[in-house]
Structure formats: C-alpha cells, structure tokens
Amino acid sequence: MSKGNIRSFLLGDAQADRVVPPSGFTAQLTLFVSGAMAFLAVFALALSLASGRLADRWASELARSATLRINAPADQRAAQTEAALKILKQTPGVASARALSAEEQAALLAPWFGAGLPLEDLPVPQLIEVIEAEIGYDAAGLRLRLGAEVPGAVLDDHTRWRKPLVDAANSLRRLALVSVLLIGGATAAMITLAAHAALAANAQVIEVLRLVGARDRYIAGAFVRRFTLRALIGAGVGTALGLGGVMLLPEASDEGGFLTGLGFQGLGWLLPLLVPLLGAAVAFAATWTAARRKLKGLA
Amino acid sequence: MIELDNVGYSYGGGELLSDVSVRLSPGSFHFLTGPSGAGKTTLLKLCYGALLPTSGVVRAFDADMRGLDRDQMAMMRRRIGVVHQDCRFLDHLPVADNIALPLIVSGRDMAAESGNLRELMNWVGLSSRADATPPELSGGERQRAALARAVIMSPDVVLADEPTGNVDWEMSQRLLQLLIELNRMGKTVLIASHDLGLIRAAKREVQARVLRISNRRLQLAGADL
C-alpha cells in the first residue's frame, strides 16, 4: 500500500463503507475475539515483564554474593572465622567479606524456628557474607586454599540454586512471550475466519461491485476498514479491562514473594497501549490477505 | 470497440461457443438471439470480461482482454454498461444509490453528480422510487433501474441480457425505447433476447443487425428477422 492509499484508508470513505452491508455476527465475533485476546495479552505481557524483572533481580543480586560457612567446634569457630576473613581479604576479586552477627543469623533462622532463638546453645555454623568485585574471584582456587587453611570452611557461591531459579524465571518470561505471540496468531486466525465468512456472505455484493467497475482495493478496503476498526475498538476495551485487572493485583512485597508484583512498573505501563494498535494491525493484515485472495478468485 | 476474433469457449469439458467472430462498431445496434442455453449470456460475459475465451481473442477498446490486469479490467468495465437478466442489486441500498453505484465506486463527487442522477431517474421513470430498496420494486422497475445503472457512467457500450425477460409487453416496449434512445445518442448496444417480437419492433425503428447463435457458432439471422 502506498502512502496515499494508507491515508485514504485511514480517513475512510463513507460511501465505500455503505456499499458493504452491515454484517451482524461477524461484527460481534470480531469485537469479542479482539477484546478477549487483548485482555489475555495484557496479562501475558504483565507476566512476561514481571518474570523478566525477577530473573534479572535474582541474577544480579545473587551473582555478586556468596556465603562462607564455618562448621567448626565452638572453641575453634572464632579462630577459623578470623583466618577465613584474612584469606578473603587477600583474595583478588573479593570486594568485601564480613561475619554475620548473632542477631543477623538469628533473624535468618527466625522464619523456621521463631524469634528469640538461643543461638549460642545450638551448633549453628558461623556465616560470612562475601561480596564479589566486578572482576570476580577464582572460586575453585579459594576453595582449595580454604580447605588447606580453614578446615571447617564451606564456600557456597549460590550457583547450585541460583541457576535453576534464573532459568525458571527466564523460561517463564519466554513462555509469556510465546503466549503473546500465540494470542496474536489466534486473533489473526479468528479474524481471518470472520473476514472469510463476511466475504462469503457478501459474494453477490462483491460480484456487483466488480461488475460496475470497482477496483479490488476499493472492495477490499471497505471490508478491511470495517474489520480493522472493530478489532481496534474490541482490543481497546479488552486492554482497558486487562489493565484494570492488573491494577487490582497485589503490590510487590517481600512477604508475598513471586506472586506479588506481577503488574507493570514505570514505563512498562505504556506497553499495553500497543496491544490495541497491534490488534488492529493484525486484523488489517488478516482481512487484507483474505479479501485479496477472495477477490483474485473472482472475474 | 468490442471485437471477438475466432473466439471459442469451453466449460466442463464441453464446447459452448466455437469460432465466434463479431465486431461491435461504435454506434451500432445488435441483437443476439438463439434458443435457451445456446450461449447468449456466455457471449455477453466474454464481451465484458466476466469470462475469458478458451481460444481466440476478445478485444475491448483495442486491448486484448487476456492482457488486462484486474485494475485495467475494472477501468474497462466502467466503459461498458451491463444490464443483467436478474438485475443484481445491493438490496441494502436504496434504488438511487444502486443506480449511482458506478459513480460511487469510481470515486466521483456525488454532490456534483446529483443533478445527472435525478435526470437519469426521471428518464427511466423512477424518480418517485428513489428511496425504495430493490426488493420493493416491481420487475419492470428493476429492469429500468438496472438500465439506469448501466448507463449512468455514460458508457460507450451497453450490453443487455434479456432486459425484457420478466416484464410485460408494454414495459418491454418502454425499455426498448430507452435502449434505442441510447443508441441514437451514439452508444453501441448489444441486446441478447429470444423475444422475436421485440426484435422485429426494434428493427422498425433502428438499423439493427441480428446475430443468431446456433450449434455453438454465430451467424447472421435470416431475412425473417
């Protein structure tokens, strides 16, 4: 389509729109399908963005930290902790390291054992928080040195459980994106079917129009404009309802974990506004293709 | 203007028309006759490109129809007015819009054309039925509306397929007079009809060639016509 054609398509032609009779059920079908799909697309988009944020957060927060556990008898624990901190200080790629206080360790265990835990009476290992520098450290080398000098030290760089979590979040993001694409494809398929039904129901109208000298793009334009407009309106309503639904979801909170904060954040709220436009574009392409194919079959 | 040169047309394995050659010169008046199923409608459809010949060449305004793309075909049809036996209207539009349909699809300014439309509706006697829808019209009114739609673009050629097939004698005479009037304005007219009375009546008023389709071939009718 040339620029001129696109302009005339967007401006519309009241006369051209009148020559195609109002098509009852296909109009309702297109409106409903576009609205329902836009509603689902908004949720899929919200899920995709939220899981993306989660994957990024887990990846960045956990990638730069590690935990050193000192499993030593009570009388050696302080000495081994001291030795481990000394080694960590000397290790290239370690930005900082500090032993967690008894209160901090108690707070970590509180969700499982409750508050007021008598930590001194329990064989709880001493934990050291290790923050990695930008260049990173040699975990294998550090383990060897710790093994030799601090026998009770166990280095946990979180790789074991960080990777599956990040992978899971990334898979969720991909699934949500695939869902958005499937929703787009399903919308296109259903609007194509509706357009086919409308074109078939109006076969005689099309024949008369061709007979009196109407060009294919004039006839196709009348159908395409109608379906595109319906899809735009339907998707607009669906998106509005979807956004309303997302707004009602609980705010992000530490207590709620992953199940909160599923909505949009910041500029992300603008992204769903593309859904009606994409819905209209899908309807345009689907109807245009269906109409051109149908018209080519006629004399 | 429209020329068929050794045209053949086959459909479903059978040959419907064979070696048909005819030239519709500017301002000429032709009748096309023959028994039902002889191929009159097919020949008319070949003349306006609704069908393409399986052999031979159909030329319209010096262009081989086979070489026209779909846009060119649409432009060519604006120069040929067609009256179908079954009329074929858009039933959801009023008669006035149906008659104006060729103007609408060609993007003409309808405000500027409203005078012509009124005049044409007067000419075919449908001024009072402008707002009626096609299903509300009688057979004769439908035929007159179809004729008005066929000529509203002031085409060079008017093709009419049994235009008097569903109307009484009086109405058929009235339609014939309209077609004769068009021919006097310089339009080329081809009417497919098996109504010999109509053909004889026309020949009394206008120089008309009568072509007959017989055994798949086209020939000039005998002296009885």
Image (tube, rainbow, N blue to C red):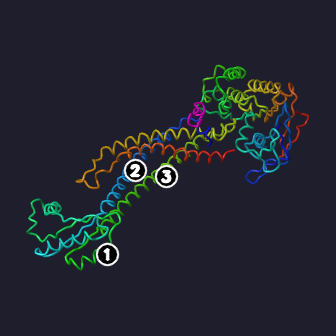
Q: Nearer the viewer, residue A43 or A74?
A: A74
**Decide: marks 3, 2 in contact (CB < 8 A)?**
no
Position in image of residue A299 (x %, y %): 69, 44
Residue in the picture at 71% in, 35% down: B84
The secondary element bearing badge 3 is classed as helix
Q: Distance between the residues labelled 3 and 2?
A: 15 Å
**Dominant SS in magenta:** helix
In front: B66, or B182?
Answer: B66
* Residue at the (66%, 48%) spot, across then down: A297
Do the dots labelled 3 and 1 sit on one chain? yes
Q: Tag 1's secondary structure?
A: helix
Marks 1 and 2, the one that precedes in the sequence? 2
Q: Residues within 10 Å of mark 1 (few under 14, many from 20)?
A: few
Eye-nearest disc, 3 or 2: 2
Residue corresponding to mark 3:
A185
Residue B107 coordinates in the image, percent (x, y): 66, 31
Return the residue at label 2: A45
